[in-house]
Amino acid sequence: MKNKYIICIVSVFFFAASGCGKKEISSVDNVGDSLYYFYGYNGKKQYISLNTKYAYLAVKEPQLPVEIKQRGMKATDFLCDKMWNARYKGKPVGTNRYYTELSIGKNLTTEQYLELLADIKRENGDVIIAPYFNIQRDLLGGPFHVFFVKLMRIEDIVLLEQMAEQMGCDIYENISPLWYRVSVTEESNSNSLECANLFFESELFEYVEIGFFDSSQTQRYDY
């Protein structure tokens, strides 16, 4: 299968994604007459906007759920996150998930789009779904379901575990000293952008980084 994917890593300073239908979003600005979301990069706000034509989907099997098919949506080829062998504290904790880009197939307002994602989640509790965003002029993407957290000191692993449990997230073994991978799950109440934002704004960790998945590019980021 030819890979046509890229994931761009950015540092999250102030980033709140849509929440799939939630009425209150803390980190959103009104720029002109438009509603914009943003993440922080080099200490400054980097504005992005919702792209209502697509959505990010992660599932446990590489196939589109029947209920989503019945909505007339299409998906790109599934990619595996290769987390089946992930470990934490020496124990196997990983499970494979397969992610794709959903094509909505209709023109929707922001409100209709967010309600659609919320409805899909209500009807398909065993999936991870998140909004898509216009990130740069030629780049759009959805938040990858795994993000990265760097502890200030090794003792802060207790804080990481507490927050992950509260948000329904899984922790995977560190990829380098003090760095850990955190994954939202099907039971998480928030998508990965919202979770990453909450981790950062807690000021308990040194860095929090998130990735965007874009199926239109010719490369992909493998962690």
Image: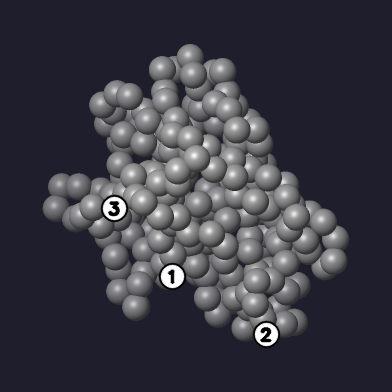
Image coordinates of residue 55 in percent, x first then y, are 41, 38
Q: Please, what is the three-letter code of the amino acid marked with disc 2? A: Arg
Is residue 62 shown above or below 139?
A: above
Residue 53 falls in image quadrant: top left
Which residue corresponds to mark 2?
A: 153
Mark 2 and mark 3 residues within 8 Å of each other at the beta carbon: no
* Distance CA(mark 3)–CA(mark 1): 17 Å
Residue in the picture at 51% in, 27% down: 120
From the top left corner, tell me how far across and down residue 144 is, in percent.
50, 52
Rounded to the nearest whole Å, what is the CA distance between mark 2 and mark 1? 19 Å
Q: Residue at x 35, y 72 (%)?
A: 41
Decide which of tag 2 and tag 1 comes sooner along the chain: 1
Secondary-structure class at tag 1 = strand
**On the image, numbered disc 1 is attached to which residue?**
11
> Which residue of the protein is positioned furthest toward the bottom in this rendering?
153
The colour scheme of the drawn protein is one colour
Q: Residues within 10 Å of mark 2 (few under 14, many from 20)?
A: few
Q: Position of residue 199 (x, y in %)?
A: 56, 66
Q: Which mark is residue 139?
A: 3
